[in-house]
Image: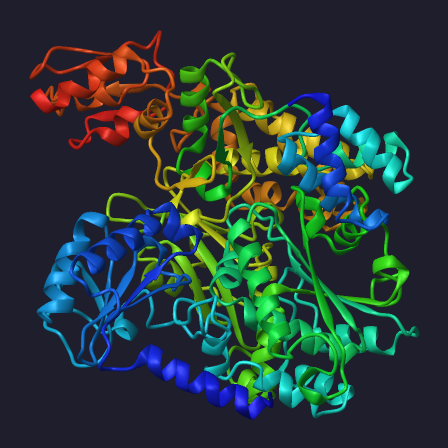
């Protein structure tokens, strides 16, 4: 089948999917949707439709994540008119109402309608693109997430999929690399190295056998950009990988994906099978004479395997330990052959660039940071989720507009970018443009895109200790600065959070951190001190409160805090007593309660449960 | 699972793979999938098949956190320790589980019903904190819900909890 035949077939199947006369229900069933109960909602729709004998007449499809994770379970409903409504917080109990009211009678259920996706206005319901969470976003990487059925390759093709590959195959490999360079694409996995230069080094390295690898070992806690993309649109990533293979002269590629992402693995496997059936993988791809195959390798649970040399050792069947560079993978990588490794998002962007051109891509972002970047926005914001913004957007827009701020009762303290390798950006830099240069200037890094928001109830010393717990456990132990450095940083931070901090500790932390940055073998050890050093830099007063006053200002470090009940505010409702896991709250109904300090475990459950602000912490 | 079953299961896995080192990790993953863990006899057989030393294979198994030597409980509970889950209180969930089940992280209850593990990040940060029981992902879990989850799977029902849950309804 020719490319033209494939696209025309895809076009008609996409038109049928989007056809205005036919009622349609889309349910977001990525991992985040499933955690909120999306599969139960799908089952409820199936049951309701078959009960009403509508199963044949209505399209019910499972799509990926549109990024509005805070509003899960998300369901888009369209009756026989052109209006598509996105509902939020859908439960199985709501399903009969949506079917009866919206599908059958054509009356949308306004109280749960989040937005009008398409079609005529609806009173009291905003347009999707006008939602504060959406209006500043530009979706290139996530162009198909939540829009297409990720098991249907024709949906991807109908939306321009593989036209980038087709264009690339008609160009000389050098011209493909030039296009990527002209677009100004930089690696989206962490360091931001120019992708064009990386590709051209692997291309010019001597050798007949070369490899390309897609690094989908998204290990940073607090990051889920790659997972969502692989679950919602695996095709764009694989298209980028084939293009990379063609550009550098490789005939085989690997996708190294985390074992903790079972749905992403399943989506990738299904996408590979569909691509092979359609002549987009295997021999003589699209009649170009180019042969290429892709193998999926599942990780086995080791954070350090996100580092490229460790990742290659893991594919080879060894302990995933990094080695010193040079030689760089471009010269001697997987099985000793020239190898090019790119992040999931970089490859999805490469496919988009080949489809729409370098100039189009370079039109987004800033002078040195072109294009868009996805971020996983989590932590203490009202609207958590997956976002994609043009680089250079101010941090405040992300936290306050897109994320909806930290809520009225709390104050914003900092954003932690890039998990355990990144740093904290404090509130005073809220107007900082988010791009590679500006983040580096304040001591953080762009990284892969994890963004965890902290408020006044987040203890920065505890956050630093948390990250060190992680890197200390994940350090592979090969080089001393990282192995011993993480242990010592963790020990000191633990002492400080437990009230045993001393005056010399701050200097020790800085000295060890500095040594690790300079002397560690790989990125894990070089960046592991970042959370400690940036929190000391911006929140030294919090460290001092722990060390000198044996006090945790955020009310987090348990050895240093005590909960008590304000007798004037307490109404005696017993809600806190019910929430207490260790039955340490006494007092009769309608009489102010008290906390038994001897048995209290300082978990704070009472404070979260109290609706009268009567539980205080100090 | 008896010794004969183990060796049968391992042979079935080995049948699918060429004798090449780069197949070691997929072989270990498939073996663990089939048996539930990686017993010593299975490792020795895999090492022989790939012409590697048992020591070499053991080194790989212990390096990756996915591999285990003992079978998990009938209901394997994984608590996410990602950043978002941490700041939203996943540590409290671990404590609640250890208290309720009477086991530490990495252990299995005496009756073999539950085992408890902490996992780096499931990538469902927007629904933090996240707990996975078997294959089912639960989002926005509270200490109260943890108790219910265990109860639903035939775990210990703390009488003090049942009592305290009734009280706010009266209030």
Question: Total label count?
Answer: 0
Q: What residue do we see at 86% from left, 47% from top? A: B19
- Front residue of this view, candidates A508 and A175: A175
Residue A485 visible at all: no
Q: What residue do we see at 40% from left, 33% from top? A: B89
- Front residue of this view, candidates A547 and A417: A417
The N terminus of chain A lies in quadrant? bottom right
With B113 as the anchor, is A34 left or right in this view? left
The percent position of residue A441, horizontal first and vertical second, equals: 60, 61
The percent position of residue A459, horizontal first and vertical second, equals: 45, 35
- Front residue of this view, candidates A454 and A152: A152
- Front residue of this view, candidates A494 and A479: A479
With B61 as the anchor, is B130 left or right in this view? left
Please, which colouring scheme is shown? Answer: rainbow
The percent position of residue A41, horizontal first and vertical second, equals: 28, 52
The percent position of residue A563, horizontal first and vertical second, equals: 31, 20
The C terminus of chain A lies in quadrant? top left
Q: What residue do we see at 58% from left, 58% from top? A: A448
Q: What residue do we see at 35% from left, 58% from top? A: A403
Instruction: Relative to A501, say whether A240 is above or below.
Output: below
With A94 as the anchor, is B79 left or right in this view? right
Residue A368 quadrant: bottom right
With A255 as the anchor, is B129 left or right in this view? left
Instruction: Relative to B63, say whether A219 is above or below.
Output: below
Residue B79 visible at all: yes
Instruction: Relative to A534, say whether A75 is above or below.
Output: below
Residue A496 quadrant: top right
């Amino acid at each position: 089948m020719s490319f033209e035949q494939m696209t025309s077939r895809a076009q008609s199947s996409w038109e049928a999917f989007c056809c205005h006369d036919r009622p349609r229900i889309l349910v977001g069933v990525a991992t985040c949707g499933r955690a909120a109960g999306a599969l139960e909602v799908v089952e409820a729709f199936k049951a309701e439709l078959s009960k009403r004998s509508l199963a044949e007449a209505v399209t019910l499809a499972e799509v990926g994540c549109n990024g509005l994770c805070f509003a899960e379970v998300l369901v888009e409903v369209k009756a026989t008119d052109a209006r598509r409504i996105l509902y939020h917080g859908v439960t199985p109990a709501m399903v009969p109402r949506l079917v009866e009211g919206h599908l059958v009678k054509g009356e949308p259920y306004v109280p749960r309608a989040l937005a009008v996706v398409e079609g005529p206005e609806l009173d009291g319901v905003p347009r999707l693109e006008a939602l504060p969470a959406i209006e500043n976003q530009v979706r290139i990487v996530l162009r198909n997430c939540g829009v297409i059925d990720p098991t249907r390759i024709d949906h991807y093709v109908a939306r321009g999929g593989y036209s980038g590959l087709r264009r690339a195959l008609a160009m000389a490999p050098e011209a493909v690399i030039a296009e990527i360079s002209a677009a100004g694409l930089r690696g989206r996995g962490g360091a931001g190295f120019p992708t064009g230069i990386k590709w051209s080094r692997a291309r010019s390295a001597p050798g007949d056998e070369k490899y390309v690898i897609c690094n989908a070992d998204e290990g940073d806690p607090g990051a889920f950009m790659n997972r969502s993309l692989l679950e919602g649109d695996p095709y764009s990533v694989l298209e980028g990988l084939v293009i990379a293979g063609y550009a550098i002269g490789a005939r085989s590629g690997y996708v190294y994906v985390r074992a903790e992402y079972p749905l992403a693995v399943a989506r990738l496997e299904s996408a590979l099978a569909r691509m092979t059936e359609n002549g987009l993988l295997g021999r003589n791809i699209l009649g170009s004479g180019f042969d290429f195959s892709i193998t999926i390798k599942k990780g086995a649970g080791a954070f350090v395997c996100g580092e490229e040399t460790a990742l290659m050792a893991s594919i080879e069947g060894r302990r995933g330990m990094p080695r010193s560079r040079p030689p760089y993978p471009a010269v001697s990588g997987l099985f000793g052959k020239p190898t090019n490794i790119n992040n999931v998002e970089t490859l999805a962007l490469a496919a988009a660039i080949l489809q729409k051109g370098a100039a189009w891509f370079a039109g987004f972002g800033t002078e040195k940071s072109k294009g868009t970047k996805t971020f996983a926005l989590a932590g203490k914001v009202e609207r958590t989720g997956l976002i994609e913004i043009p680089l250079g957007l101010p941090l405040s827009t992300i936290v306050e507009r897109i994320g909806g701020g930290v809520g009225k009762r709390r104050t914003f303290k900092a954003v932690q970018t890039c998990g355990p390798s990144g740093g904290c950006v404090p509130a005073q830099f809220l107007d900082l443009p988010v791009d590679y240069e500006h983040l580096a200037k304040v001591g953080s890094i762009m990284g892969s895109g994890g963004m965890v928001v902290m408020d006044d109830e987040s203890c920065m010393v505890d956050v630093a200790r948390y990250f060190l717990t992680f890197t200390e456990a994940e350090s592979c132990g090969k080089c001393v600065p990282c192995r011993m450095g993480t242990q010592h940083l963790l020990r000191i931070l633990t002492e400080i959070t437990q009230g045993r901090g001393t005056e010399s500790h701050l200097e020790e932390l800085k000295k060890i951190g500095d040594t690790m940055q300079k002397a560690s073998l790989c990125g894990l050890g070089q960046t592991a001190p970042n959370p400690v050093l940036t929190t000391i830099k911006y929140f030294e007063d919090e460290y001092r409160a722990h060390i000198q006053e044996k006090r945790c200002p955020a009310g987090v470090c348990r050895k240093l805090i005590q909960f008590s009940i304000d007798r004037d505010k307490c109404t005696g409702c017993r809600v806190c007593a019910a929430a207490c896991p260790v039955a340490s709250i006494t007092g009769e109904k309608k009489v102010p309660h008290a906390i038994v300090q001897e048995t209290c475990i300082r978990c704070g459950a009472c404070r979260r449960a109290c609706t009268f602000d009567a539980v205080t912490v100090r | 699972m008896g010794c004969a079953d183990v060796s049968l299961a391992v042979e079935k896995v080995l049948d699918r793979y060429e004798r090449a080192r780069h197949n070691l990790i997929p072989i270990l993953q498939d073996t663990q999938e089939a048996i539930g863990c990686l017993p010593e006899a299975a490792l020795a057989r895999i090492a022989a098949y790939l012409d590697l030393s048992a020591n070499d294979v053991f080194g790989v198994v212990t390096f990756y956190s996915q591999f285990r030597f003992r079978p998990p409980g009938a209901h394997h509970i994984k608590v996410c320790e990602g950043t978002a889950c941490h700041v939203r209180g996943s540590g409290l969930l671990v404590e609640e589980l250890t208290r309720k089940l009477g086991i530490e992280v990495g252990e299995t209850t005496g009756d073999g019903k539950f085992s408890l593990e902490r996992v780096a990040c499931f990538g469902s940060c927007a629904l933090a904190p996240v707990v996975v029981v078997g294959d089912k992902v639960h989002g926005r879990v509270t200490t109260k819900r943890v108790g219910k989850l265990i109860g639903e799977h035939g775990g210990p029902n703390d009488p003090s909890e049942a009592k305290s849950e009734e009280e706010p309804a009266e209030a």
